[in-house]
Amino acid sequence: MPLARALKIKKLADALGAEALNVNLANVKEDDFKIIRDSLHDNGVLVVRNQALKPAEQTAFTRKFGEIQYHINDEYKMPGNPEILILSTELDAEGNNVGIPDAGSDWHSDHSYVDVPTAYTFLQSVILPKVGGDTQWIGMVAAYEALSTEIKDRIDGLVGIHSFNRFRNSRMTRLDRHGDGEAYYSKRSPPDAFHPIVRTHPHTGKRALFISPRFTLGIKNMDDKEAQPLLDHLFEHLIDERFIYHHKWQKGDLVIWDNRQTLHLALGGVKLPEVRRMHRSTVVGEIPV
Ligand SMILES: [Fe+2]
């Protein structure tokens, strides 16, 4: 009988990203799990190829990394499997969305608007469109390290104000499907969360920027006249080809990313009625320091 091929990790881009081959996450050996977790910490994003995990299998693999983080929206959790959030362009018989159709359409780190944000996100492709639906990530360690000493000194010790409320964020446009937005966002938004603009990764010890255009509204104890230009400068710096990994999804890809050291963006561009369906699960992290 031929021996099973060994797990292989290959880098995908300079700033971040690697792929894992020859592994079945439904039945992963402990040694391989450790390699996967270490590669994720080293590379920020890990693309695991050729997976076909059922919802319960994805949940079980996710739990190996820690405690499940449930999304604040109930309506798009998978019935019977609330650990899985459905992202989809599909409509049901009544014409309602079966999942979030436009999740992640602005740069962000998952759940940074709560006190204990997400550590890891797991996104499995289930149905892919012919065109569109790519995802990008920014390596926030590389982005931090490339800042000038002057800016590093200036942001040292500063604290960002994070909110889910798109309505309060001058950098965001409103989404038509939420009406005027105010009622939707004020009802669902948790109280503001406050996180250091530069955080230290609990496993690698590396420093990374921890702000995003989607969720960071301002800087604590700093007037907007000073804070907004500083945030603009940082966003302009970090949204840069040098720090980006661009992912074209393949059937069977399950991508894991480390939200403590990356931002991500769903590029959209799916032409309806083509379907893009993904299953997302998340693991709660720690209070950023
Ligand atoms: Fe996200």
Image (tube, grey):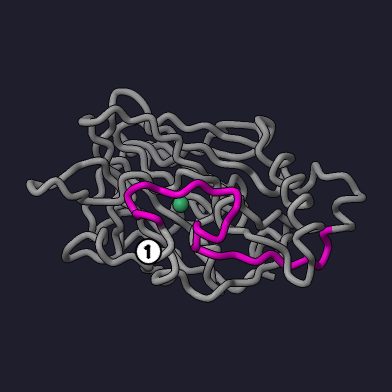
Q: Residues within 10 Å of mark 1 (few under 14, many from 20)?
A: some
Q: Position of residue 90 (x, y in %)?
A: 20, 42
In the picture, measured across the screen, residue 162 lies left or right of residue 247, that is right
Q: Position of residue 228 (x, y in %)?
A: 74, 54
Asked which secondary structure carries label 1, the reply is helix
Give the number of callouts: 1
* Residue under the point 69% across and 45% down: 235
Can residue 239 be seen in the rendering of this structure?
Answer: yes
**Residue at (26, 41) in percent of width and height:** 89
Residue most toward the front? 180
**Image-quadrant location for residue 225:** bottom right
Residue toward you, 10 or 105: 105
Residue furthest to the top in view is 130
> Is residue 164 shown in magenta?
yes
In magenta, the rendered stretch is 155-180
In this rendering, is residue 158 above or below 99? below
Query: Where, quadrant-wise, is the C terminus in this rendering?
Result: bottom right
Image-quadrant location for residue 266? top left
Task: Give residue 246's position: percent from left, percent from top.
Answer: 52, 31
Asked whether 185 or 41 is in front, the reply is 185
Q: Which residue is mark 1?
A: 184
11 lies left or right of 26? right
Image quadrant assignment for residue 52 = top left
At label 1, which amino acid type do we have?
Tyr
Left or right: 219, with 101 as reference point: right
- The residue at 61%/42% (across/down) is 138
Q: Residue furthest left?
A: 93
